[in-house]
Image (cartoon, rainbow, N blue to C red):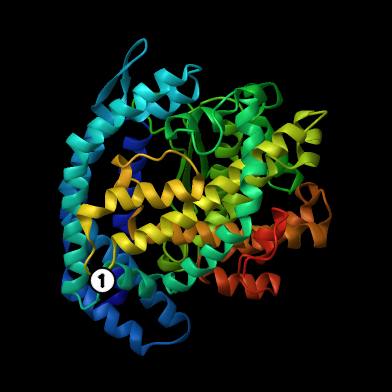
Amino acid sequence: MDLEAYRAEAEAFTEELARELYLQGAGHKEKLEIEPIYARHASLFDRATVEELRELGAAASGDGGRRLRQLLGFAFDGLLGRETRELAEELAWLEATLEVAGPEGPVPFRSVPVVQANEPDPDRREALERARDELLESRMNPLYRDALEREHQLARDLGWASYAGAYAELRGVDLEGLAVEAGRFLAASEGAYEPSLGPLLERARMPPLGEFRRSDLARLFRAPELDALYPAGSLVESLAATLAGLGIELEGQANVRLDTDPRPAKSPRAFCSPVRVPEEVYLVIAPVGGREDYAAFFHEGGHAEHYANVDARLPFEFRHVGDNSVTESFAFLFEHLTYDPTWLREHLGVEDPAPAVEHARGSRLYFIRRYAAKLAYELELHAPDPPLAALPDRYAELLGAATRVRWTRASWLADADPGFYVACYLRAWALEAIWWRALRERYGERWYASPAAGAFLRELWQGGQRLDAAELCAEAAGAELGFAALAGSLGLEAAS
């Protein structure tokens, strides 16, 4: 194998695919057209290539071994994507074109969470949820299931016992061990969960935990009562001012391109699209309003700064591939600022930040518990011989038990992110808590106003994702990656 030629073509493919995903996800085009991209680069993702990269990586060490293992992950992801590309295109087309009946007319499928977030009537929110779930069940779940079964078979054909076994090796993460740690976090946070989330539900005049419905989640996290604390006109300005405090001029970063315009087919889920790292990075958000806008915009701003500051001389693998727990940790770090009381007073002029801090703590605890349950569920979904007929109920059971929300079954496939990305989020939350603690210890409570802290972060960002989360944590913070700092940041007993 000519590895340098492979890497050059891999980078060309990555750019083309990322650009297409950006254009379709941001609502610039209706149809996702990835089939021609895979066709142009078909040789990247054949089974023989995956097998050869696996052999080469097993025999290599040092940075050479890292690069080969990261290329293997890229090739395997690409092989799965190639073999399910027509299903992905159809699903993306359905997401962009389907509509449900809303209280005031048709609502685009992708916009259901946005409408729910701004709909004060709980029965209307529930009607939207039911209509969305009916479309999932009838039009989309058959496609998701077909893709799942193809991916499981490919993992077995390539010598792994299961899809879960493949990604444990590819991510270099003991997924079962991480699930045990996450389970300990669930136990450690059990007593704090209702006291954290209960007041938010009461203030929002919503049913208590146990009666609270999944259709109400978007409205709860939208938190319209906090809108006055998070003025829409200050959104971009506050990120720019924060970065300026770190010695980074957002307007001077020609490689960071903001996309904040609303479009009917735009994905409601904010995202950062690193088309060419570090030369061309898109920061995309579909505005909802208030606290969530800030959280999403700063989260994706953390991604954008990470990618935009990567050393351009690094090889393809370290700029575009690697352990995404790393980039997610920086995204969570910036998101954390939007509920830090000192930052709120200083940048948004909030006199009493307590309601915002309380809301963030409750929602953060909810999401971590939700993802802990998701990991347990996805290990069952991607086991060697999963009982697929029973898994919709199992999904609702596990997610409902962890969140105490009346969870529905319909998203049992749509809610499973590819390649155990759930593990990246859990490790990123743990790593972010360690970054936050280290930054405060080294640069003070207002670390975000310290150019020295900015220099520290830029040094971390320059390395791209050469190191995985545990390695970077040990090297840069002298700490072991685990849930203890995260539990401490939430006022809990150590979870690991």
Which is more toward the observer, 470 or 161? 161
- Name which residue lies at 30% across and 72% down: 166
Which is more toward the observer, 158 or 302? 158
Above or below: residue 461 compared with residue 240: below
Which is more toward the observer, 128 or 85? 128
Horizontal and vertical percent for residue 458? Answer: 65, 58
Asked if residue 461 can be seen in this view, the reply is: no
Which is more toward the observer, 52 or 96? 96
Locate the C terminus and report the quarter of the image it occupies: bottom right
> In which quarter of the view is residue 215 placed?
top left
Identity, as a three-letter code, of the amino acid under mark 1: Ser
Q: Which residue is mark 1?
A: 162
Locate the N terminus and report the quarter of the image it occupies: bottom left
Question: How crowded is the residue under tag 1: few (<14 C-alpha within 10 Å), some, or many (20+)?
Answer: many
SS for dot 1: loop
Horizontal and vertical percent for residue 173? Answer: 45, 72
- Name which residue lies at 67% across and 34% down: 199
As drawn, which residue projects farthest toward the bottom? 59
In screen coordinates, is 372 left or right of 263? right
> In which quarter of the view is residue 463 placed?
bottom right
Horizontal and vertical percent for residue 268? Answer: 42, 32
In screen coordinates, is 284 left or right of 472? left
Horizontal and vertical percent for residue 314? Answer: 49, 67
- Name which residue lies at 71% across and 59% down: 488
